[in-house]
Amino acid sequence: MSKVLIVYGSSTGNTQSIAEKVGEQIRAAGHEVDVKDAADVSPKNLMEGYDAGLFGCSAWGEEDLEMQDDFLPLFEAFDQVGLSGHKVAAFASGDQSYPHFCGAVDAIESLAKELGATVITEGLKMEGDANANPDAVASFAQDVIKNL
Ligand SMILES: Cc1cc2nc3c(=O)[nH]c(=O)nc-3n(C[C@H](O)[C@H](O)[C@H](O)COP(=O)(O)O)c2cc1C
């Protein structure tokens, strides 16, 4: 059994719904899962006691990538989270009409790798909430579970 932390930044609830659904599925596979809003966490040693961290964040920029407001402070202090040696995956809800579709996923993966984490599966990028594409959500959760 692994202990998994899921942290999301979500303004209209779409990424939050993905976080909750993925959390349910990982829990159903027998793992211990905490799902937290980025607004409620503090970066320092956030990963302590966890084997894996899943990070979800929507994007709000027009030309440039802008991370969701609650997630930004966490992302800016990602080096304090204690990611080194941990398993990480990223997810987001976004809109394909923007230049950086679910751009936070790439930003999280890239920085997590730089900080010594292992990205265990391709990030989930989708439009709408978890109900908009349950198959994509389930497939992402299964990939995570396989690699825990
Ligand atoms: C001003 C504005 C900028 C946005 N920028 C992006 C973007 O850069 N990339 C993207 O994929 N979606 C972008 N979106 C779409 C939202 O990220 C999308 O609606 C998402 O589902 C919101 O997720 P949340 O409810 O978890 O915050 C933008 C939306 C607005 C209104």
Image (spheres, rainbow, N blue to C red):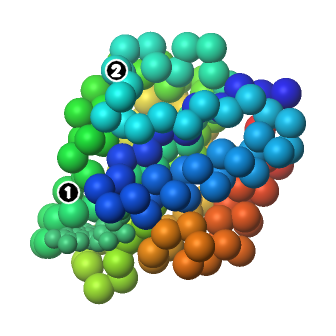
Q: What is the residue that sits farthest to the bottom in this orientation?
A: 97
- How many numbered marks does the figure carry? 2
What separation in Å lies between label 2 and label 1 (alpha carbons)?
A: 20 Å
**Which of labels 2 and 1 is toward the front?**
2
Residue type highlighted by circle 2: Ser
- State the image coordinates of residue 2 (x, y, percent, origin top left): 77, 28
Is residue 45 visible to the viewer in this orientation of the structure?
Answer: yes
Q: Is residue 54 above or below residue 11?
A: above
- State the image coordinates of residue 65 (x, y, percent, origin top left): 21, 61
- Which residue is denoted by mark 1 in the rendering? 66
Helix, strand or loop for disc 1: loop
- Which residue is denoted by mark 2 in the rendering? 42
Q: Tag 1: Cα neighbours inside 10 Å, few (<14), some, or many (≥20)?
A: some
Viewer-side residue, 112 vs 69: 69
- State the image coordinates of residue 111 (x, y, percent, origin top left): 39, 40
Is residue 106 visible to the viewer in this orientation of the structure?
Answer: no
Residue found at x 36% / y 47%: 9
| Quarter of the rendered structure image containing ligand 1 | bottom left
- The reply, left or right, for residue 123 in relation to residue 40 is right
Viewer-side residue, 103 vs 93: 93
Q: Does the Cβ of the disc 1 residue fall within 8 Å of ligand 1?
A: yes
- State the image coordinates of residue 86 (x, y, percent, origin top left): 61, 27
